[in-house]
Image (spheres, helix red, strand yellow):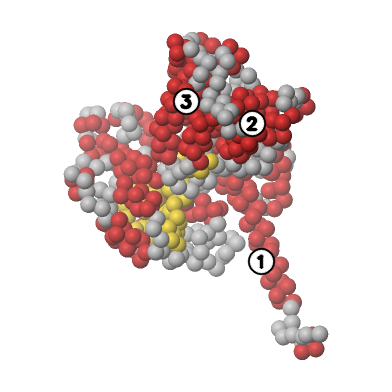
């Protein structure tokens, strides 16, 4: 039986800013007494400002916090508040409420596992924000749900509702339809070579998606709708009856003579097409070089196929930055690796024997994090900056990964039975697949590592790597406390860094490298913005103090 919709009630409580009543309607519990009001750390740029986070609801360890504020804090302050509250509850939803608008933040772990990013969900009083209402419906729990509800189940429901991965999967589901349609309508590859047709359909769609990302940044002749414009101009140049001109006369030269060729050696075969293509960058890595399927077969694809594909692509928001807004049509370059993973199994017989493997984000994230960050730190220390590990003494478990301390605040039950024998306690104490001996060893490791880190036993980045600490979080905090001159040095170090993946396939390692570098660049940029704003306000106050309190009448008019 379908549950009745409560969207009208949701909207009422959202407009009133009554988050406690809203989450009680969703079946959540009242927060613990010690979370009713938590004073947030004062901001050094706004020392007189005092903010409080009020615990509005809690369910199996997942907390909902609300912060009343005059205006939504800048991103750096949001991150600091999120980190402070994570010390009380590692899994949380955070709501900033100005009265007129709300910013809902979901700290989402990056696909590579390297740190967290804040996913935004906005709500304005009186608006019809159906996307947020749908997400709230996803974290609604009935009385029957509570009978066997566990912390991981609550967390999974919240993740499914508020993260951005579900958008990637929804895109892929629709993508499959267009992949099948393109495969069936490719001419020039015999029907008995179905594998080759599917393979080429994947190659072509990956190229087009890559272009969609970079055209939205203005990198393709300065045109944000470059491919759609190209289709229109080709039809104008070749006439309405040339149904196959776009692929043969435009896309293939764009791929092979344009994007796949260095600027110094470009030699356009058709000046008319070169004029339509315009200024496009050189994309190294082989994705736009002539494929052996293109040299083996005389491939033809009708223009109408691309019309359909572009209409599908235009329904989505393509972005290269790392600030997802939680919109239901927003995708980022992770989609390329995700699709590559789905299709690699049938692209070519013997593909894996030839060395083509898709490395999943958790592996690439671990390898890039513990390679890039030590290199950055070594160079910053050589440039005269302090090692970020100066932040570790007295930090408690702040830089330990959450999984290590899972269930640490609860006592173990007596007995030697496996966790599954204790449905309530076991599932809230043990990570998936853990036995009690694993839980015991992990808890011992947690206490030992906290004592070592908190007591100043980890003094270098190499020791932090050995301890498997959260290096991304450490670097974000390190950059957020820098002085102006230190920011300049750190920026030069990051700017001079080069990352090379000599066996780049879908770019999985490079995307993970971006996941590692982006939080550092963002934290450094936000810190520089804070310093600049503080200096600007100081200058305004100084000039205001020097300005005469009244203007002489002789200075008025002319």
What distance separates the C-alpha of mark 1 from that of mark 2?
A: 59 Å
SS assignment at label 1: helix
SS assignment at label 2: helix
SS assignment at label 3: helix
Asked which quadrant contains residue 24, the reply is bottom left
Is 278 situated left or right of 205 in this image? right
Q: Which mark is residue 182?
A: 3
Label 3 neighbour load within 10 Å: few <14, some 14-19, many 20+:
many
Circle 1/circle 3 CB separation < 8 Å: no
Q: How many marks?
A: 3
Counting residues from the start of the chain, the first of labels 1 and 3 encountered is 3
Counting residues from the start of the chain, the first of labels 1 and 2 encountered is 2
Q: Read off the residue under disc 1.
A: 537
Q: Quadrant of the N terminus?
A: top left
Residue at 78 percent across and 85 percent down: it is 557
What distance separates the C-alpha of mark 3 from that of mark 2?
A: 23 Å
Indicate the position of residue 281 as horizontal and vertical percent values. Answer: 69, 33
Residue 214 drawn above or below residue 540: above
Label 1 neighbour load within 10 Å: few <14, some 14-19, many 20+:
few
Q: Nearer the viewer, mark 1 or mark 3?
A: 3
Q: Nearer the viewer, mark 1 or mark 2?
A: 2
Q: Which mark is residue 279?
A: none
Label 2 neighbour load within 10 Å: few <14, some 14-19, many 20+:
few
In terms of depth relative to the viewer, which is nearer, 235 or 134? 235
Indicate the position of residue 361 as horizontal and vertical percent values. Answer: 49, 30
Is 51 situated left or right of 139 in this image? right
Q: Which mark is residue 238?
A: 2
Indicate the position of residue 254 as horizontal and vertical percent values. Answer: 65, 28
Q: Quadrant of the C terminus?
A: bottom right
Residue at 27 percent across and 55 percent down: it is 6
């Amino acid at each position: 039986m379908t549950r009745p919709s409560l969207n009208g009630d949701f909207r009422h409580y959202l407009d009133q800013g009554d988050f406690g009543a809203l989450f009680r309607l969703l079946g959540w519990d009242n927060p613990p007494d010690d979370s009713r009001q938590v004073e947030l750390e004062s901001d050094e740029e706004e020392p007189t400002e005092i903010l409080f986070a009020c615990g509005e609801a809690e369910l199996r360890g997942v907390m909902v916090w609300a912060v009343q504020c005059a205006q939504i804090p800048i991103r750096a302050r949001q991150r600091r508040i999120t980190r402070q509250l994570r010390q009380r509850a590692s899994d949380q939803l955070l709501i900033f409420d100005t009265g007129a608008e709300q910013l809902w933040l979901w700290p989402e772990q990056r696909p590579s596992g390297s740190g967290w990013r804040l996913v935004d969900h906005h709500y304005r009083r009186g608006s019809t924000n159906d996307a947020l209402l749908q997400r709230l419906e996803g974290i609604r729990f009935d009385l029957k749900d509570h009978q066997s509800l566990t912390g991981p189940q609550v967390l999974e429901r919240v993740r499914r509702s508020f993260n951005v991965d579900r958008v990637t999967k929804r895109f892929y589901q629709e993508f499959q339809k267009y992949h099948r349609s393109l495969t069936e309508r490719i001419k020039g590859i015999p029907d008995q070579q179905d594998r080759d047709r599917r393979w080429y359909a994947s190659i072509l769609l990956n190229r087009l998606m890559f272009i969609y990302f970079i055209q939205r940044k203005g990198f393709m002749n300065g045109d944000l709708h470059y491919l759609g414009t190209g289709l229109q101009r080709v039809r104008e140049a070749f006439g309405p009856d040339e149904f196959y001109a776009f692929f043969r006369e435009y896309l293939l030269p764009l791929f092979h003579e344009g994007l796949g060729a260095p600027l110094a050696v470009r030699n356009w075969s058709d000046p008319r097409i070169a004029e339509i293509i315009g200024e496009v960058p050189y994309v190294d890595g082989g994705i736009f070089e002539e494929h052996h399927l293109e040299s083996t077969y005389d491939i033809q694809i009708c223009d109408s196929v691309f019309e359909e594909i572009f209409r599908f692509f235009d329904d989505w928001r393509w972005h290269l930055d790392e600030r997802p807004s939680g919109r239901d049509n927003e995708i980022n370059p992770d989609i390329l690796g995700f699709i590559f993973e789905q299709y690699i199994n049938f692209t070519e017989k013997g593909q894996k024997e030839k060395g083509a493997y898709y490395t999943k984000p958790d592996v690439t994230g671990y390898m890039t994090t513990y390679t890039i960050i030590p290199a950055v730190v070594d160079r910053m220390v050589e440039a005269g900056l302090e090692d970020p590990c100066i932040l570790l003494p007295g930090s408690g478990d702040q830089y330990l990964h959450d999984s290590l301390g899972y269930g640490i605040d609860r006592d173990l039950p007596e007995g030697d039975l496996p966790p599954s024998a204790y449905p309530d306690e076991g599932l809230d104490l043990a990570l998936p697949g853990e036995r009690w001996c694993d839980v015991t060893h992990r808890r011992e490791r947690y206490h030992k590592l906290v004592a070592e880190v908190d007591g100043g036993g980890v003094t270098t980045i190499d020791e932090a790597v050995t301890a498997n600490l959260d290096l991304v979080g450490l670097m974000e905090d390190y950059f957020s406390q820098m002085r102006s001159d230190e920011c300049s040095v750190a920026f030069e170090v990051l700017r001079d860094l080069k990352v090379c993946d000599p066996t780049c396939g879908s770019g999985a390692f490079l995307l993970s490298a971006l996941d590692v570098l982006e939080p550092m660049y963002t934290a450094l940029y936000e810190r520089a913005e804070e310093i600049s704003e503080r200096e600007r306000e100081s200058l305004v106050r100084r000039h205001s103090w020097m300005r005469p309190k009244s203007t002489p009448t002789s200075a008025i008019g002319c």
